[in-house]
Image (cartoon, rainbow, N blue to C red):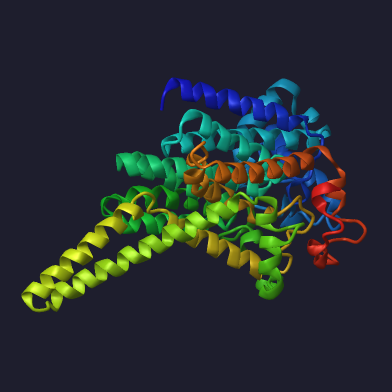
Amino acid sequence: MKGTDIKFAFFLGIGLLLFSIQGPVYYGSDADYVVPQLVSIFQHGDQNIDEYSHLYGEQYQIRKVGNHYYDAYPYGIVYLALPPAFLLNAIYGADYLSLHRDRIAVILASCLMAVATMLVFFMSRLRGLNRWRSGLLALFAGLGTSMLSTGSRAPWQQSGVMLIGMGLLCLLILHRRKKDAGTLTGMGLLLGLGFMVRPLMVLYAAGIGLYLLFDRESRKGLHFFVLPGLAVAALFVWQSFHLFDAPLPPYYLADSSGFNFDYANSIPGMLFSPNRGFFAWHPAFLFSAIALVSGTASSLRYAALRLRIAVSDFFPLPERKSTDQNIEIRSVAARVQNERTKDSFLPFALLIVLGHGFIVASYEPWWGGHSLGPRLLSDLIPLFLYALVPFIRRMDFAHPAFALTLFVCMAFSCVVHIRCIFVPEMGAWNRSPVDINLAPERVWDSDDLQWFR
């Protein structure tokens, strides 16, 4: 990575940060008590929100444990937001942060998403895109995805997942080059922190862990990956016992009453409905889906050919026929292996995507409650950006029709997501003419699009 790339990414991130904080829309809901926790840390050195105890029973985000009151949602995002919050506290003071908590929440979330878009740029450069194509993908991530409409509007759990997810992918690419312990340790630490941000980060841990397990060289140093993650998890368990007298916070121990398994409605709705569909809000990611599926198909073909070679070696045919067949099989296997090694992580990325999608589809409010677009699937944005890289590479004059199609898809998404941060009516869509939680079929209402409220 050249110094010019670092400068480019820095100014890109600063530009996106300044743009994002101009958007007046705060849309927090579940994330309403992140800033109060930060204020409590600065003023009292603890994370309880006893100052808001009078709202207990009225605000669903407040949970009473023993004699104290806590935010009901995971704490990891609070720790991710600490660095920019510390700077704002040094400038304005904790009282100011508390009085202007919605605005501060937007600034903190925008800082995290600015760093995430810088990581998108680095990921693209590490995967071989030139500087301008990498910048294009980073701009698309920062302006045309849920990084902007969800991630920058408040410090949601998803904001933290998108940031950590991009960090993991950068480290994974570096590890494929270096095969060193440092990148494994970094991934383990990030995944441990990620679990504190959102329990569904276990899917990232499983996908990346399986990838490393199947890689012969990485397998030898797998303890460098596992032990740091377990160390962070141990600290998390210790904190949970200290605060809640339980191994995990209440959010992680919730029962299954919120699951409904209405897949006939949830899967089409969360993927393709105009008001909540992941691909409706991110049509460019249809290309990413193609990459994920085709990459997995290549790996499966290679595995099948390797199995045929093993069988033919164990049960040889007559010499000449066996030799000819083996030469043919090995030749085909070599071609498929060359195709597969272009990105052998894609099958494991698809496993993460399918696992996450299955869990969200099983959840009763699969539409994400009061959200700006497909919030519950925004955890997957890093993986879809990763899979989009080969298509960004093909955006040139040699493929004009394809380049124009992809550019139009990206431009459409930018218009939609940028409107989310400047037009309050898009958030009001969730409540009028009838609350989305009471009438989830509104996700298919093409006469009242949240996009263009």
Which residue, as the protein is rendered here, is positioned at the far left?
Answer: 319
Which quadrant holds the N terminus?
A: top left
Looking at the picture, tell me which residue is in the foreground, 201 or 11: 11
Q: Residue at x 52, y 47 (%)?
A: 388
User: Residue 441, position in %: x, y?
Assistant: 81, 67
Comparing 281 with 431, the one in front is: 281
- Residue at image point 45% right, 59% down: 294
Viewer-nearest residue: 166 or 327: 327
Toward the viewer: 204 or 143? 143
List the single residue furthest toward the right.
433
* Snapshot quadrant of residue 137: top right
Q: Position of residue 357 (x, y in %)?
A: 59, 63
Does 224 sit above or below residue 335? above
Residue 147 seen anywhere in this rendered image of the structure:
no
Left or right of 121, for residue 296: left
Give the image quarter of residue 139: top right
Q: How many numbered callouts?
A: 0
Residue 133 percent coordinates (x, y): 52, 33
- Residue at 70%, 58% in the rendered image: 277
In the displayed structure image, the side of residue 197 where residue 93 appears, left or right: right
**Vertical relation: 75 (above or below) 143:** below
Q: Position of residue 116 (x, y in %)?
A: 57, 37
Is 69 positioned to the left or the right of 351 in the image?
Answer: right
**Res 446 seen here:** yes
Tell me where residue 201 sits by quadrant: bottom right
